[in-house]
Image: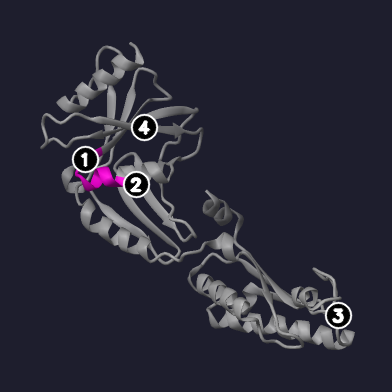
Amino acid sequence: MTTRAYTATFALMLLAGMTVPPAEGAVRHYGAQLERSEWRVSQYSPLQCTLEHAIPRYGDVRFLSEASREMNMRVVVDMRRLPDTYDEAEVHSVPPAWRPGAAPRKLGTLPLYRQYDSELGKQMAWVLLTELEKGMVPTISYQDWHNEQDHVRVSVSAVNFHERYQDFLDCVANLLPFGFEDIAFTVLNYHERSTELTNASKRKLMRVGEFLSHDQDIELVLIAGYTDAYGSRDENQELSEARARSVKDFLMSQGLSETQISIRGHGEMRHSAGNETEVERAQNRRVVVQINRPFDQQLLGSR
């Protein structure tokens, strides 16, 4: 059977509510029944919003949006039984049973990765959300990788969707307008011979503190203080340590524990610029803040 013929047959099956296609084999259908359709906002914070739907005997579908300078969204199909091969699934918008006569519509494709959950990007995630908002049933279909005679059909129910969707949208509207990558490496600059930050660096530090006050996955914050070359070495060493300590004290006031923070003063060593002009010296009067998450959390945030 050609791809076009199979797609047409699949559309007729969906409209008729059939569970068994022609002689090629059977369709295994996974989806929540009316009384078991559950949506929940499993993460609600200024850093991440997650809208989740459980699919009995199959897994979960999760819509995620994270703090970032730009609006982002993705959908993850979390399968209990991961694919054994690389393949591609079709994604359709299917009318519910109470809308006879409406035709299913193909929305796109979903890549299947060997031993990994499948994922769709921002555009398709929003498309699926709007289809659910209209009461449609996003449906994923693919050939079973263990049994070539079988096709798998996974339906995402719109029942009980709207109330939790509103909660999710409220969460998305309150995400921080910057992400971990924006604060993970931050350089703060100081006034001459002082532990007082420049106005721009005060705003940077406030942004770092706001993010870390919500992030429960911080492993270690490294704070390194520096000075320009004016003054004695001993004075500069003490000043660099004082600058690092002041940043540490601020971050602890935002909820970090002392064990999560490591500080060091380098005095006038390791200049980032020369020391001949005021502009160059201003660049050397600095504290560098490096923030580390566990490796798996860094991977998650970069996806």
Q: Nearer the viewer, mark 3 or mark 1?
A: 3
Q: Position of residue 138 (x, y in %)?
A: 28, 38
Q: Which residue is mark 2?
A: 126
Q: Position of residue 132 (x, y in %)?
A: 25, 45
Q: Which residue is mark 3?
A: 229
Q: Amino acid at mark 2?
A: Trp
Query: Quick one: SS at disc 3?
Result: loop
Question: Which picture quadrant has residue 125?
Answer: top left
Give the mark nearest the N terminus, 2 or 3: 2
The magenta span reads 129-137
Residue under the point 34% across and 39% down: 58
- Answer whether residue 130 is magenta in the image: yes
Q: Amino acid at mark 4?
A: Gly
Q: Which residue is mark 4?
A: 108
- Answer whether residue 288 is magenta in the image: no
Marks 1 and 4 sit apart, C-alpha to C-alpha, by 15 Å
208 displayed left or right of 117: right
Q: Residues within 10 Å of mark 2 (few under 14, many from 20)?
A: some
Give the mark nearest the N terminus, 1 or 4: 4
Query: Quick one: SS at disc 4?
Result: strand
Marks 2 and 4 sit apart, C-alpha to C-alpha, by 13 Å
Residue under the point 21% across and 40% down: 136
Marks 1 and 2 sit apart, C-alpha to C-alpha, by 14 Å
Q: Nearer the viewer, mark 2 or mark 3?
A: 3
Q: Residues within 10 Å of mark 1 (few under 14, many from 20)?
A: many
Q: Are marks 1 and 2 in contact (CB under 8 Å)?
A: no
Q: Is residue 219 above or below residue 236?
A: above
Q: Position of residue 188 (x, y in %)?
A: 67, 75
Q: Residues within 10 Å of mark 4 (few under 14, many from 20)?
A: few
Query: Quick one: SS at disc 1?
Result: loop
